[in-house]
Amino acid sequence: MSTALPDRPAPLADARRFAVVASRYNSEFVDGLVSATREELAAIAPCATVEVHRVPGSFEIPLGVQAVGERGNVDAIFAFGLLWQGETSHADLIATAVTNALLDLSLRLKVPVLHEVIVAQTEEQARERCLGTKINRGTEAARAAVRMLQTLDAIRGAQP
């Protein structure tokens, strides 16, 4: 596990629209991801709007992402959830299904989908990644979204 956050990108000067699709399940931790993302976007995308949509659990996140993405009025979508790794393979099955669905949606919709459906083994791991400041995955996702938008802008603006 990397414990270093990526560097903060140069701020976006224009208005962008972000959406968050977040699980209601394990809300204490998921809310930490949402808050960290909002805080970081306020610094690196100060003209941005952020809408938040709640779904029941992590398994429902891809359908929420699809519904938001198909509207066609967002520049990037954050997918936030927390799964507990237990004694059975249930968390692995959900994590794999969600991962595959989010990748497919990002490619089909041509919109960055930032996947932060975290699988944690302990409460300490969840706290570090969702509520902490050192390796908060919400902060990391915000930085990755802005960098991806900057990269896509450069690619789309490049002339062959």
Image: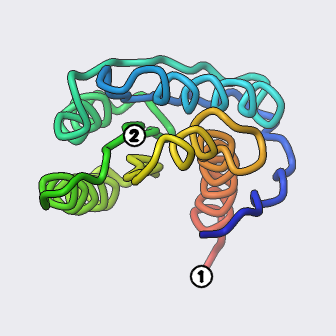
Residue 64 image point, x, y percent: 24, 30
Residue 147's quadrant in the figure? Answer: bottom right
Q: List the residue tagged with mark 1.
A: 160
Disc 1 versus disc 2: distance between alpha carbons?
A: 33 Å
Q: Is residue 44 left or right of residue 23?
A: right
Mark 1 burial class by Cα count in 10 Å: few <14, some 14-19, many 20+: few
Q: Is residue 99 left or right of residue 19?
A: left
Front one among 109 and 99: 99
At which x and y percent is residue 54? 32, 18
Check disc 2 and report its element: helix, strand or loop.
strand
Q: Which mark is residue 72?
A: none
Which of marks 2 and 1 precedes in the sequence? 2
Identify the residue shown where x is 37% and y is 29%: 21
Report which residue position mark 2 lands on.
79
User: Which residue occupies the foreground of this view, 155 or 147?
Assistant: 147
Q: Nearer the viewer, mark 1 or mark 2?
A: 2
Residue beneath the point at 61% across and 19% down: 49
Question: Which residue is at a point 36% across and 18% down the rendered structure image?
Answer: 53
Color encoding of the figure: rainbow
| Disc 1 residue type (three-letter) | Pro
Pinpoint residue 148: horizontal percent, then vertical percent: 61, 57
Label 2: few (<14), some (14–19) or many (≥20) C-alpha neighbours in 10 Å: many
Dot 1 falls on a residue whose secondary structure is loop
Along the viewing direction, whichever of 53 and 31 lies nearer the viewer: 31
Q: Are marks 1 and 2 in contact (CB under 8 Å)?
A: no
Residue 13's place in the image compared with 147, above or below, is above
Q: Amino acid at mark 2?
A: Ala
Q: Position of residue 151 (x, y in %)?
A: 65, 63
Q: Quadrant of the N terminus?
A: bottom right
Task: Answer left or right for 120 relative to 139.
Answer: left
